[in-house]
Amino acid sequence: MTESVFAKSVRIAAVVSLYWVISISMVFLNKYLLSSPDLKLDAPLFVTWFQCVVCLVCLFLLSFLGEDYPWIDKFPAFSIDLKVARQVLPLSAVFVGMITFNNLCLKHLGVSFYNVGRSLTTVFNVICTYIILGQKTSIKAMLCCAIIISGFLLGVDQEGSSGELSYMGVLFGVLASLCVCLNAIYTKKVLPFVDNNIWRLQLYNNFNAIFLFLPLMVICGDVKAMYGFEMITSAYFWGMMTLGGIFGIAIGYVTGLQIKVTSPLTHNVSGTAKACAQTILSVTINHEIKTGLWWLSNMLVIGGSTAYTVVKHSEMKAQLNQETLPTKGNGDEKRGDNVV
């Protein structure tokens, strides 16, 4: 029994650590690709488009692994049904907006402020679920959102006082937060079209995104920027670009793996803690000097997000217990405690 518990603990620690490493590495790598003075590349849409291409290639290669390596998740066969692609298209448009605004936010904001810059996802989730789904939110959850908003506003104020704030970056962060929320809502609607398989959904999202990005790259000048790019023939540059795409598919895998070996609640808490570590790491690496109020804004965002996760988890568990109570015997009422 002791060995079993120990082995499970080691596996959980390994998965959580892997999630942290991949997630943080992906943020720093994308920041380098999007705004590094070494590369001098002003083509954020092209960077994002190429990562979608790499993700699609990775999904093609992973489709051969399911039978030979059963310990890896079963990846679907690589096939594109144009009818399904059209059904997924509305979600893909939101998906394109999400990854585009996310990368534009990262391009214009430092990694240390990136977490605060796109911290309003939870707030938009409350707003959109009420407007689109008609679901109301408890007072406790709304108070958590108020804490997040106060942290966001304080962070914008403090970053602006330091002279390092890009208001375009903040705008892109707000739009990214909105798209993340809409992506979650539309995903639930579209999943039945892909047999509720999240990997098939990634396949169609990246397939559609490749074509949706093409006119955007022409309009925004990314194609022209690539023609004049000095490192267009550099193996190092294309290697870093490919690595960014690999991280893109890897984060989807380890996110699902972390939820699988822990729980959705633990995953959300882990993600919040990771954001905190990411902020501290960025400030340390870049030798940034931040005020006490700046750090307070981060703590408000992280604390509000964590509190919201805990509140929603408690409400879901209470609702589940209430729903199962009439159909359970006297000795079974507490079984719902271990469901979520």
Image (tube, grey):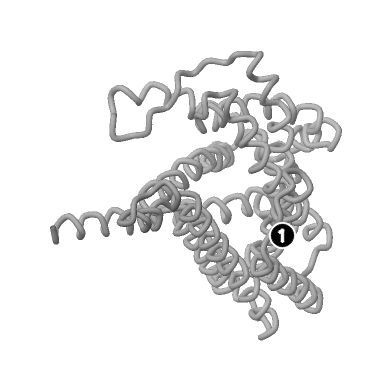
Q: Nearer the viewer, residue 187 or 203?
A: 187
Residue bearing mark 1: 123
Question: Residue 92 vs residue 11: left or right?
Answer: right
Camera sees residue 37? no
Question: Residue 239 vs residue 166: left or right?
Answer: left
Q: Residue at x 36, y 58 (%)?
A: 334
Question: Residue 226 vs residue 61: left or right?
Answer: right
Camera sees residue 294? yes
Q: Residue at x 20, y 59 (%)?
A: 5
User: Outermost residue toward the right?
Assistant: 219
**Where 266 sits versus 239, above or below?**
below
Secondary structure category for the residue under label 1: helix
The 10 Å Cα crowd at callout 1, few under 14, some 14 to 19, many 20 or more, is many
Q: Residue at x 64, y 69 (%)?
A: 140
Name the spot of residue 70 as percent of width and height, x first: 28, 30
Residue 257 found in image quarter: top left
Q: Quadrant of the N terminus?
A: bottom left
Name the spot of residue 136 as percent of width and height, x first: 71, 55
Q: Nearer the viewer, residue 125 or 245?
A: 125
Q: Amino acid at mark 1?
A: Val
**Where 5 sits versus 184, above or below?**
below
Q: Residue at x 60, y 23 (%)?
A: 193
